[in-house]
Image (cartoon, rainbow, N blue to C red):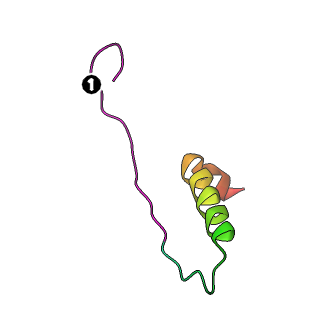
C-alpha cells in the first residue's frame, strides 16, 4: 500500500528443508541469506 492505494509489487517466497542431522541450521540460514542477496542483485553473479 502506497499513499492509501494498493500497488503491485514483486515478491518471491522461498523455503528450505534440510535434515538437521546432516545440515547445520546456521549454514542453511547463511545459504538463504546469500540466495536473497543474489536475487536482489543478480548482476553480482556476473562479477
The quadrant in which residue 24 appears is bottom right
Give yes or no for residue 11 being in the magenta stretch. Answer: yes
x and y, in percent, of residue 33 in the image: 62, 56
Quadrant including the N terminus: top left
Residue at left offset 62%, top offset 63%: 29
Residue under label 1: 6
x and y, in percent, of residue 8 in the image: 30, 33
**Badge 1 density bin: few <14, some 14–19, many ≥20, Cα 10 Å:** few
Q: Is residue 47 above or below residue 5?
A: below
The quadrant in which residue 11 appears is top left
Left or right, 14 with respect to 24, comes to left
What secondary structure prevails in the magenta region?
A: loop
Question: In what element is the residue under mark 1?
Answer: loop
Left or right, 17 with respect to 37, comes to left
Quadrant including the C terminus: bottom right
Left or right, 41 with respect to 4, comes to right
Q: Is residue 1 above or below residue 33?
A: above
| Residue that extends furthest to the bottom in the rendered view of this protein | 22
Extent of the magenta region: 1-16
| Residue that extends furthest to the right in the rendered view of this protein | 47
Left or right, 14 with respect to 26, comes to left
x and y, in percent, of residue 9 in the image: 36, 36
Q: Nearer the viewer, residue 16 or 10?
A: 16
Amino acid at each position: 500500500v502506497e499513499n492509501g492505494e494498493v500497488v503491485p509489487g514483486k515478491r518471491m517466497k522461498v523455503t528450505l528443508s534440510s535434515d538437521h542431522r546432516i545440515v547445520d541450521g546456521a549454514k542453511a540460514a547463511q545459504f538463504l541469506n546469500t540466495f536473497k542477496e543474489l536475487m536482489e542483485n543478480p548482476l553480482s553473479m556476473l562479477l
